[in-house]
Image (cartoon, rainbow, N blue to C red):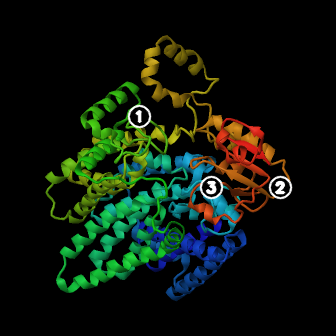
Amino acid sequence: MFLILVNYLIILIFMYLILEHGLRESMIRSYIIILGFVVVFTETLSLVNQITRPAILRSWSFLTFILLIILAVKLWKRKTGFFELIKIRFSEDHKRFSSLEAVIMICIGLILITTFIVAFFSPPNSYDSMTYHMARVSNWIQNQNISYYPTSIPRQNYSMPMAEYEILHLQIMSQADKFANLVQWSGFVLVILLVSKIADYLQISRRGQLLSALFAATIPMAILQSSSTQNDLITGLGCLSFGYYLLKTIREKSWKYVVYSGLSLGIALLTKGTAYIYCAAIGLVIGISGLLSITWKTRFFLIKQLASIIILALVLNSGVYYRNIDLYLSPLSTATDRVTSDKLSLQGLYTNLVRNGAVQLAIPIPEVNKYMTRLVAGHLGENNTNQDITFSNTDFVIKFNINEDESGNLLHFVLLLLGLMIYPWIKDPKRKDLSIFLISLLFSLVLFSLTIKWQPWGSRLLLPVFFLGSPLVGYVYDKIKYPRKFSIIFILSLTLYSIPYLTLNDTRPLFPLIREDSPFRTIKLRRLFSNHPFLYEQWSESITPFYEESSVLYTDRMDQYFSGYLPFRDDFFAVMDSVNELDVDVVGLELRSNSWEYPIWVLANRHAGLGLPEFIHVAMDDISSTLDPFQGEWPEYVISTKGSNSFFVEELDYSYIVDTSIIDLLRR
């Protein structure tokens, strides 16, 4: 962690003091460059099976040495003292902030501090983290490479790995997972900066830039994901950065922006499959508008730049493409998980547009949510259950949640709709670039709804769309000239709206507001709701988080891994206590395709380093079984989540050592 931060700061100083970019621009570019180095180091070291702590430390240390030499030479040539240079640059950039601007910055700062505390003090514990995000990192550390391996959870292989590459480096260097959530948190910080910088580039006032940043900072899904190991924030950062630098490439015809645009595109595509949809929309809209706005003479030059951006992005993703082709015979594989629509149609597009918008409207009143669900289902009719455009085994339901998978963004959704309705009526000849961004937003939403099946967790996949629309908030503010009182109300409303999402995350609550020993809880509120059961039912989704007996500040870290799924805890502890008493080199893992794997590594203290026992997946039923070097050589002990359907029990007469409802330990 420390070495990566040092390298980031060196590049940042170089960008800010030597190249004299603005502070925000320097921070954004430096982060993109660091992510590029993460990819290069990971892919290169993997080729020689050196995904190890010494090799990774040497790589980052060598980079630090080289960057320090370059920086020292450049500073020496400037013949100006380091601190004097900083003073000069800050004096050039510094402009006095108004009281209202200071309030906005304080609000954003408090949000970042709160999310940092939650991210740092809580372990990874989202469902996807347990099944593949974090589990694949532990497998890579054990294998000392990122090559595909036999696994019963195909997503560990084919899912795009950029966010996990970052986690891999942090986990190996720290020999723990305490920094894993900070990958998304750092992406959150950079998204906020980037939104404000895009607003600046679009010639929105400084107050408008800060309001745009506050809008992005208070998006519920962004807040909830900022303390998790999901990857939609990093995806959003890549998509947004790609759009920003692509626009600058077209406007300024500079090859340096080609590099940043290509890196950003590569990072986005390497993070999540949905980035292909968003970046296609952004690239087509910005690229075509750019080609149409210039003369034939300069179009060929721009086409070369656009081609270079795509090539750079593909090179960055070449390792993943090669591994996918090698195993799945396709550069992009979704294996058995069918998430794209089986049939493309205007009817399907309309159905998913309505459903993707409707889930944003959830409020903490169950009866209202049920009514809206029935209303939407009635309006859509048979299309609402059409399996061609609906993820398998899911039903459309509007439900209020405070978690990083399904939470809606009601206030921000409404504000974006209002902004889009007001925008056409604003007369401004200088808004061309903002119009391009908004068309990219709408085209992204259309492409997403057309090609991706509706799914209950689709709200988090739409996060980049909300980021694309964030500058609109500052622009509308600038043009309408709201009175000061309205501005204060707007700022406070956004900030207050974010508080439940900052403090009452389902799996990472900062604090329960009413603890068990609170007189207010045990006497007043409990009596009120016990005497009014219907009222309790009406507001149960709102008040339940206030009664949770958990907090990232005082709950045991081991218990926090199971915060969202407490019934799993005792079963995993029972099995792993027995495994830790064994004196064996290898333990097999017979898992379902959506089983929790990461807690096995954590409870064996094998999640961040080498050691025994070695965990290997066995009895796979997908194509990765062809990679199994131990085919037919069954280990003496097997951990199984298949219960009575276990191949080892039914076919090989293994017996139970520990038998629980979730996970078992078997012996030959």
Q: Nearer the viewer, mark 1 or mark 3?
A: 3
> Nearer the N terminus, badge 1 or badge 2?
1
Q: How far apart, in angstroms, are the residues tagged by discs 1 and 3?
A: 35 Å
Q: Nearer the viewer, mark 2 or mark 3?
A: 3
Where's residue 209, x and y in %? 34, 57
Q: Amino acid at mark 2?
A: Val
Q: Considering only vertical position in the picture, is 380 above or below 64?
A: above
Q: CB atoms at circles 2 and 3 under 8 Å apart?
A: no
Residue closer to the observer: 494 or 392: 392
Residue picked out by circle 2 = 584
Residue at the extreme bottom of the image, as rendered: 77
Q: Using the rendered image of the protein, determine whether residue 200 is visible from the camera's viewpoint.
A: no
What secondary structure is found at the residue carrying circle 3? loop
Give the quadrant of the N terminus. bottom right
Q: CB atoms at circles 1 and 3 under 8 Å apart?
A: no
Residue closer to the observer: 126 or 542: 126
Give the crowd class for mark 1: few <14, some 14-19, many >=20 residues within 10 Å.
many
Residue picked out by circle 3 = 620
> Nearer the N terminus, badge 1 or badge 3?
1
Residue drawn at (46%, 29%) of the image: 542
Residue drawn at (76%, 45%) of the image: 653
Q: Considering only vertical position in the picture, is 604 above or below 161?
A: above
Where's residue 469, x and y in %? 31, 54
Residue picked out by circle 1 = 399
What secondary structure is found at the residue carrying circle 1? loop
| Disc assigned to residue 601 | none
